């Protein structure tokens, strides 16, 4: 019987069957605070070590041939944290752009932001936009950073844009999501033992495989990413079929 099979749920393409290589992986990078607490260090140190993990995992995504890696860096709910912690996170974002942009640009990485980063301070917005412009022509791995991102707002905005253009359908909403230009989400990883989505990629995760680990984000290594990809390759995705 004919039914809706949207392009992202197409079961015939690569990244869909057993033994397949994931094209698009997303990570909820959680546990920086607990990593620091265990060592009696300030939370900001945990976040700093978290950035080191980001650097290594982004490099690994490139060498492992992922088409897209989406990292949850700051949620719309993270504004609820104390001002000094938010300040530390913003400072780390700036220093990361300064220290790592050349490497991304030189290695054909395209940067992409999802979320309302324009609500950040003007100097950060300018740095982010410079980074986007410098890597816009690259066609290797896309490194997607979710900044001031909330999935419910993304879906609501996409639905409003779809309605302004015509009928609201799953396809018309999907075409307006921030991720519309990316391959379908294959694998969603969350570190630190929490088993929830925390308002991340709710729509995109409809048929993504999930991989949860107790490892705290600053301890997450490329070998863990490989472990998750290997687990993904062993899974059979059915998309409701049989
Ligand atoms: C994740 O680590 C980083 C961000 C949310 C920015 P946390 O800061 O949430 O660490 P825990 O969950 O308190 O250990
Ligand atoms: C999710 O982690 C957000 C990011 C990793 C940026 P949180 O630590 O903010 O999530 P909750 O509060 O435990 O759900
Ligand atoms: Mg957390």
Image (spheres, rainbow, N blue to C red):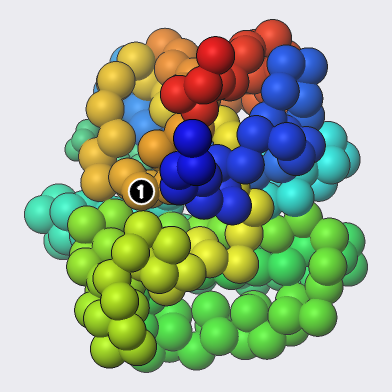
Residue at the spot of label 1: 203
Please tell me which residue lies in front, 205 or 4.
4
Indicate the position of residue 77 as horizontal and vertical percent values. 17, 54
Please tell me which residue lies in front, 204 or 223.
204
- In this rendering, does residue 183 appear at all? yes
Residue ID at (68%, 86%): 133
Q: Is residue 156 above or below residue 88?
A: below
Report helix, strand or loop for mark 1. loop
Q: Is residue 180 left or right of residue 229?
A: left
Could you classify mark 1 by the number of other residues whose Cα lies within 10 Å: few (under 14), some (14-19), or many (20 or more)? Answer: some
Q: Is residue 111 left or right of residue 201?
A: right
Q: Is residue 186 left or right of residue 179?
A: right
Indicate the position of residue 236 as horizontal and vertical percent values. 62, 13
- In this rendering, does residue 121 appear at all? no
Whether disc 1's CB lies below 8 Å from ligand 2 is answered no
Please tell me which residue lies in front, 175 or 104.
175
Q: Is residue 89 above or below residue 168?
A: above
Which quadrant of the rendered structure holds the C terminus? Answer: top right
Indicate the position of residue 163 as horizontal and vertical percent values. 26, 81
Residue ID at (83%, 35%): 64
Q: Is residue 94 left or right of residue 116?
A: right
């Amino acid at each position: 019987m004919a039914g809706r099979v949207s392009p992202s749920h197409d079961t015939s393409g690569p990244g869909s069957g057993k033994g397949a290589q994931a094209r698009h992986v997303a990570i909820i990078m959680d546990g920086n605070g607990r990593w620091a607490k265990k060592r009696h260090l300030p939370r900001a140190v945990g976040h700093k070590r978290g950035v080191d993990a980001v650097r290594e995992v982004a490099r690994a995504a490139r060498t492992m041939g992922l088409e897209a890696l989406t990292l949850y860096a700051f949620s719309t709910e993270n504004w609820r944290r104390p001002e000094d912690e938010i300040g530390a996170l913003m400072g780390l974002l700036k220093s990361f752009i300064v220290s790592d942009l050349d490497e991304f640009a030189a290695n054909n990485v395209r940067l992409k932001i999802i979320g309302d980063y324009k609500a950040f301070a003007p100097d950060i917005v300018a740095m982010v936009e410079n980074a986007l412009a410098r890597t816009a022509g690259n066609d290797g791995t896309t490194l997607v950073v979710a900044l001031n991102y909330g999935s419910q707002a993304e879906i609501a905005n996409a639905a409003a844009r779809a309605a302004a253009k015509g009928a609201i359908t799953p396809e018309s909403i999907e075409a307006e999501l921030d991720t519309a230009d990316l391959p379908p989400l294959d694998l969603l990883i969350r570190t630190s033992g929490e088993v929830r989505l925390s308002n991340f990629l709710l729509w995109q995760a409809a048929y993504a495989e999930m991989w949860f680990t107790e490892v705290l984000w600053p301890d997450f290594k490329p070998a863990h990413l490989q472990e998750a990809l290997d687990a993904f390759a062993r899974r059979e995705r059915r998309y409701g079929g049989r």
